[in-house]
Amino acid sequence: MKKLMMVLAFAGVSLAGMAQEADPTEKYSVATNSFWSNWFIQVGADWNAWYSDEEHGQNLSTSPLKKFRANPGASVAIGKWFTPGLGLRTKLQGIWGKTVTDGNNYGNSNKYWILNEQALFNLSNMLYGYNPNRVWNFVPFAGAGISRSMTYNHYGVGLSCGILNTFRVSKHVGVNFELGWNSLGTDGDGITSPKKTGRGWDSRDNQLYAEVGLTFNLGKASWDKTPDVDAIKALSQSQIDALNAQLNDANAENARLKNLLANQKPTEAKKEYVATPISVFFNLGKSAKVASKRDLVNVEALAKYAKDNNANLLVTGYADSATGSKNFNQKISENRANTVADHLVKMGVNRDNIKTAAKGGVADLSPVSFNRRATVEVAE
């Protein structure tokens, strides 16, 4: 029997290893879920075989299919996964068992139940990374609990271990196949031996079982990937760079306007406007919405100038060449130019007086984020 169990365990581990090699998954950290997430309920039917300490030395058949030692049973369990690799469950199993005594009087009925608290170790997730769509998960478990023989009105304590194989059907439903062992001391079958009749396996009441059942995942049954802090920092920095660029442009424009008012004649205002484009900045990968509406303040002044003087405006879109393909950058620069043109129309500029152009990806400004913009200027 010991050799049989060792062979089954080795086969299970080998098969699991081969299955996971065919399921390569990028490892990543997951965020901690709330206490009420990742609960599950299991129901199952099993075939259980009993090996009593009273049969030591009688050379009875060890086959788990013999009628004198085997019966069907049922189980129900509730548990929770605290991480993708570690969980706990409380399992109740029992109903029909057998007490194996001696060769002349074996096969006695033993109605029983066993209640175990067990730790679950999902080796598939531990070794190969969490994958919510993995079909097969290999889950060894171990625990301890109490038992009661209702036929003989006797309680006992024991240990348990085994292998739980879960097969995904959907996000909330799975099929499970379980092989387990309950080692229940000398009184698990309801009969307490007056003295130990063997050593090791033969000195205890043992129950082996094979079980098929269903697993129902409750509430949130998945795990979210932890945020990429570096990516968030990079995005925040690009937004800061864009704001700094806007501030620099605004300061330069204010200085230019002050100089214009102080030193130029009114008739020369149009010529000065032509020389200084106004920038409107966008965030990475965005073209339908400007980064800050404050960019449109200076554009409004230019729009008023164009309306008052019936002037033509040129809107040119840009993208930074450090990100995106050539075709993508060309398209996003066109969209940015059209977005600013639409704002000019809303400000009262005639659409016929607005021309648009797109330069695609460029590296004119430093840092590279400054190139994610559209410029507005008075056309020649």
Image (cartoon, rainbow, N blue to C red):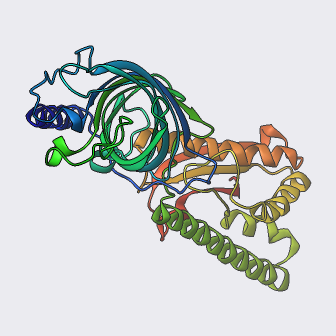
274 lies left or right of 261: left
In the picture, measured across the screen, residue 88 lies left or right of residue 167, that is right
Give the residue displayed 39% in from the left and 36% down from the top.
190
Q: Nearer the viewer, residue 277 or 295?
A: 295
Residue situated in front as seen by the camera: 244 or 380: 244
- Answer yes or no: is residue 7 visible: yes
- Give the answer, above or below, for where 260 lies relative to 16: below
Looking at the picture, tell me which residue is in the foreground, 74 or 156: 156
- Where in the figure is residue 352, as x and y percent of width and height? 79, 37
In the rendered image of this protein, does residue 281 appear above or below residue 218? below
Q: How many marks?
A: 0
The residue nearer to you, when weighing 249 against 221, is 221
Q: Position of residue 337 (x, y in %)?
A: 65, 46
- Looking at the image, residue 366 sits to the left or right of residue 138; the answer is right
Residue drawn at 47 percent across, 65 percent down: 368
- Residue 201 is situated, as x and y percent measured from the top left of the image, at 17, 43
Residue 214 appears in the rendering: no
| Rendering quarter of residue 78 | top right
Q: Quadrant of the N terminus?
A: top left
Residue 10: percent from the left, percent from the top? 13, 37
- Name the residue located 67 percent from the left edge and 63 percent from the top edge: 277
